[in-house]
Image: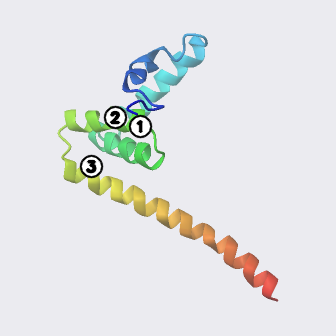
Amino acid sequence: MTETYYEPRDLEDFANIGEDAPEAGRKFFDYYATATGAGKLTEREKALIALTVATVRHCPYCIDAYTNKCLSLGVGSDEMMEAIHVGAAMVAGDTLAHATQIRKIIRKKEM
């Protein structure tokens, strides 16, 4: 089976996401452009952040878009993978930090 739930051509339709809610769509895209455009951080730095978030949030559309964005901005594969490892470490740390809840419940029950 070669079909998947996520189809690359669907990414091309994202620009039309506001067709049934034009004001909300416009506001989203204005915000998105501001948030991802150059500011105190460069567009390159923000693209790496976006790629990392896309990867840890498991969004194939964003992974596609931001891998290509990073490549267009001269980001090397080694830099992208380093950023992804930062994201993976953060997710692992977040998961392990939540283990404190498990440990707390166990200690309480052992009293």
| Residue at numbered disc 2 | 64
Q: Residue furthest front?
A: 1
Mark 3–mark 1 CB contact (< 8 Å): no
Q: Residue at x 40, y 24 (%)?
A: 11
Location of the C terminus by quadrant is bottom right
Colouring mode (rainbow / by chain / secondary structure / one colour): rainbow
Percent across and percent down for residue 53 are 43, 46
Residue 12's image quarter? top left
Residue shown at 41% from the left, 27% from the top: 7
- Residue position for label 3: 80
Asked if the residues shown at circle 1 and circle 2 are in contact, with their CB atoms under 8 angstroms apart, the answer is yes
- Tell me the distance, in whole angstroms, between the alpha carbons under discs 3 and 1: 15 Å
Q: CA distance from mark 1 to mark 2?
A: 6 Å
Secondary structure beneath disc 3?
helix
Marks 3/2: CA–CA distance = 13 Å
Mark 1, other Cα within 10 Å: few <14 / some 14–19 / many ≥20: some
> Is 90 positioned to the left or the right of 76 in the image?
right
- Nearer the observer, 41 or 46: 46
Mark 3 surroundings within 10 Å by alpha-carbon count, few (fewer than 14), some (14 through 19), many (20 or more): many
Chain-order first, disc 3 or disc 1: 1
Type of residue at label 1?
Pro
Three-letter code, disc 3: Met
Q: Which residue is mark 1?
A: 60
Q: Is residue 20 visible?
A: yes
Residue 65 screen position, x and y as percent? 34, 32
Sequence-wise, the earlier of marks 3 and 2 is 2
The kind of residue on which mark 2 rests is: Asp
**In this rendering, the label closer to the viewer, 3 or 1:** 1
